[in-house]
Image: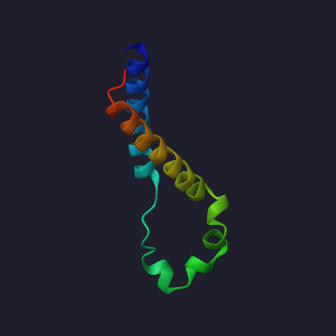
Amino acid sequence: MVLRIILTVLFIIICIALTLIVLLQEGKSAGLGAVAGAAESYWGKNKGRSMEGNLVKITKALAILFLVLAIVLNLNVF
């Protein structure tokens, strides 16, 4: 029972964090910058090392945790 409460609280925290991180990310459409070639700039090439790249990695990790916790909480084992 205590483990289920802890996992539920963790699940809620992950849900809130996932929502906030998705809202912080920029859209995939580059707008007029893509027409002018700005997508191939320094920031476009090094996106994996930038803040945007970190947000994508964190989003993937939180999404995996979200799915795993959703499955575990739905098992009704405890």
Q: What residue is at 59 percent from the left and 53 percent from the top?
A: 54
Q: Would residue 63 be found to the left or right of residue 38 on screen?
A: left
Q: Would residue 5 be found to the left or right of residue 60 on screen?
A: left
Q: Residue 49's x, y, as percent?
A: 67, 59
Q: What residue is at 56 percent from the left and 53 percent from the top?
A: 57
Q: What residue is at 44 percent from the left and 28 percent from the top?
A: 10
Q: Residue 34's x, y, as percent?
A: 49, 81
Which residue occupies the foreground of this view, 30 or 64? 64
Q: Residue 74's x, y, as percent?
A: 32, 33
Q: Residue 40's x, y, as percent?
A: 61, 79
Kindly indicate the quadrant of the structure image that contains residue 68: top left
Q: Quadrant of the N terminus?
A: top left
Q: Would residue 45 be found to the left or right of residue 30 on screen?
A: right
Q: Residue furthest front?
A: 77
Q: Judge whether 76 appears above or below 44 on screen.
A: above
Which residue occupies the foreground of this view, 16 or 42? 16
